Image (cartoon, rainbow, N blue to C red):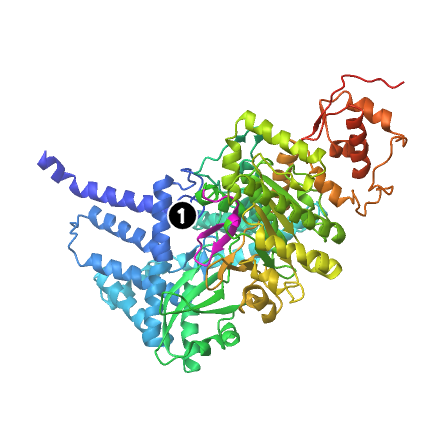
Amino acid sequence: MNQFLKKFRQDVISIGFLGLGLFLALALVSYNPMDPSLNSMGQGLRSTNYCGIVGSFLADMLYQAMGLAAWVVVACFGKIAYASFKGESLNLKNIRFVWALLLIVNVAALFSLYLPNTKIFQGQIYLGGLLGLGVSQALMQAFNSVGVQVILWSLMAVLVVFYSERTLQELAEIPQGLLADMKKKKFTDKIAAFFSGMFVKEEKTKKSKKDEKAKAAIFPLSDKKFVEKPSEEEEEEDEELEELLAAAEEEEDEEETEEDEEESDDEEEEEVPAVRLAQKRKVVMKAKPPRRIENWDMPKLALLEDPPASRIKIDKAEIQRKADSLVEKLKNFSIEGSIQDAKPGPLVTMYEFKPNADVKISKISELEDDLSLALSSESVRVVGHIPGTDVVGIETANLKRETVYYKDLIAEDQFWSEDLALPMAVGRAVDGEPKVVDLRKMPHLLIAGTTGSGKSVFVGSIITGLLFRHSPKTLRLVLIDPKMVDLAPFSTVPHLVLPHVTEPKKAATALKWAVREMEKRYKSLSKFGVGKIEAFNEKTGNLSKADVEEHEKINQELEEGKAKLDQYYYQPLPYIVIVVDELADLMIVEKQNIEEPIQRLTQKARACGIHLILATQSPRKDVVTGLIKTNIPGRVALKVASKMDSRIIIDDSGAERLLPNGDMLFQAPGVGKPTRHHGPYLSDGEIGNVVKHWASQAEPEYDPLAMKALDGFAGGDGGEAGGGDGGGFGEEEYDERYDEILSWASEQKEISASLIQRKFRLGYPRAARMIEIFEKEGVVGPANGSKPRQVLVSSYREQ
């Protein structure tokens, strides 16, 4: 057996290395950066590589490490197979392996030296790979450009000599011998004649291929008669060359095919991005939130669109270049130090600069504009001293920026944690880590940003996140939107306490109702001896049926005794989130009626479960007053117009240097300095899907007392309120639609004023008066909090 293996040992080694070289060549040829690899998630385990998933991983590692120099490895395998086939023994200790390795490094370094920023394969691979890039940059720092070129080319010549084990004279004789053989057989003359004819006749044809294709539809018959055909004499001469140039013609056909493919690629250049954009990355959520809460179907993650499959990869060369430029520019201003680390994020990269002991940090902060110019960056922000470290943070905008998609954020386990009552996905930090906070613990939020900063998208993402976590039983919303459009998509969700408020005067009334609701809730908490809404809900949720009936009886007696202000809640209460999208517009028109209720709510509303989200484009002192800002520790500053605006929001400068579209500084309660985040992107279509999901289950059931306050009932300024008795009417007064509404009501089990209002398109005061008449006449039962009234009659026919 040993004799048998010894006999075929060389053949096995030759075939093995030839197979390895062929396998590697096929893997490199069919490399696709979208295939699964260490740098790409791909599409599951599916790979388009000729050599499968193993080939995709192998090709990616070689290209990332060596770039195009990876083909030298293929050549080495071929050389070993050829040498083994000729009978040369394979010795792994042979010094040739060292020369081959150094030759690969040298080739990679040359690629990176001459084309350092050129990338292939959809901009994912450097020509010299990371290995060549690192070697060339290290040599550049020591020898500069000219010296590095001399060194690398000299090494190339030496390594070729060592690897081939031939002298330069012997190597030069190889092409000379080939030319001499070709000259003997008159190959050169015939090849020259062939190529000269090809360039004369075929070059025009190739250049006009695109024009012919473009004109084909308009001039389908044009230029056909002008196509040149070879004469009979030329055909006879070409027949003599056919056998000698068969291989050359085949190669030429292959080149033409490749050119045609490139041309078609150019023509389909606009279609390729669309195809790539169609490829989505499946977002998987590890947490298992409840699909159904009582009678409500909760939204699914599938309502949001999957982000694109391709991601923007970090350009390490750009990071290194900016780090060197940063140190050099600071040195020009006598600020010595070194870059300790670079933390790239989706939008910016933060460099940790360690200054020498004799450097003042304030000197660095004064150079933001100079650093921005030196780095050719849209924005540079000096963070200052990073707590717990001995470095200064310097943030600069990335050349290529990545979008943070909302679906990625809410798929995080943190968003679905039971510890977060009102989760809010802020975005991703500078280092790319997701940031999810609890609005309940903040307990209010102030947002400021100019037009184009991403403020409306951020506010919409907050509301959408709350709709993912809460049903109308546990969350109610009040949306105040003087601009009329930003919060309008949410106007049909059943979580609303009031209709979408767009008028400043009604906004003031809605906030005053919220103050009265807060006071009633505090009375309820005091009644049950608890200090916060969670304890109240737990205690009232465990009440027996008899206890509930007793509390209901007490509240009815208070109502009959005209002591409505002493009524209290005895059932679990939902959180209430009040969103004001443009505070400045309200403060201009109704400052006296707006500022006071906001101050009271921000001071006291936390314990009873009422929270405010205030947003504005104009963070002026007369808009964001001192009392309002003092009671709102949670703040978000997107890009603002000036340093003054930044200081008003976050008590520090920096927001004026932010980038548009979601770049923000988030000031968390109890944290000394604001931190930079990039907010999530949420499209209008995704918001529409979530709203449609909720709107299909129920219509909004507005709170009756809130509607009375909003429409001017009981002494308000409602347009339909009439009479000196606060909007009521006497027994002798008759409503022309009484019979019609009574006929409809007798067919229902439960009705409410808001239901009558929507059904018959009436004003709320008129619908509420109709409910009072029905109660006096025994058509409906007594009021039961915010629940609809029970219909007591079985049928009615119009007479």
- Residue marked by disc 1: 29
Mark 1 is surrounded, within 10 Å at the Cα level, by few (under 14), some (14 to 19) or many (20 or more) other residues, namely: few
- The quarter of the image holding the C terminus is top right
Depth check, front residue: 278 or 200: 278
Q: Is residue 792 left or right of residue 171?
A: right
Residue at image location 44% in from the left, 42% down from the top: 413
Q: Is residue 418 left or right of residue 767?
A: left
Depth check, front residue: 396 or 176: 396
Is 652 situated above or below 104?
A: below
The answer to whether residue 236 shows anywhere in this view is no
Instruction: Give the quadrant of residue 186.
Output: bottom left
Residue at image location 57% in from the left, 68% down from the top: 647
Magenta stretch holds residue 438: yes
- The quarter of the image holding the N terminus is top left
Depth check, front residue: 474 or 133: 474
Magenta stretch holds residue 591: no
Badge 1 amino acid = Val
Depth check, front residue: 722 or 555: 555
Instruction: Point out the stretch of residues depicted in magenta.
Output: 419-440
Whole-percent x, y for residue 400 in the image: 51, 59
Is 365 situated above or below 462?
A: below
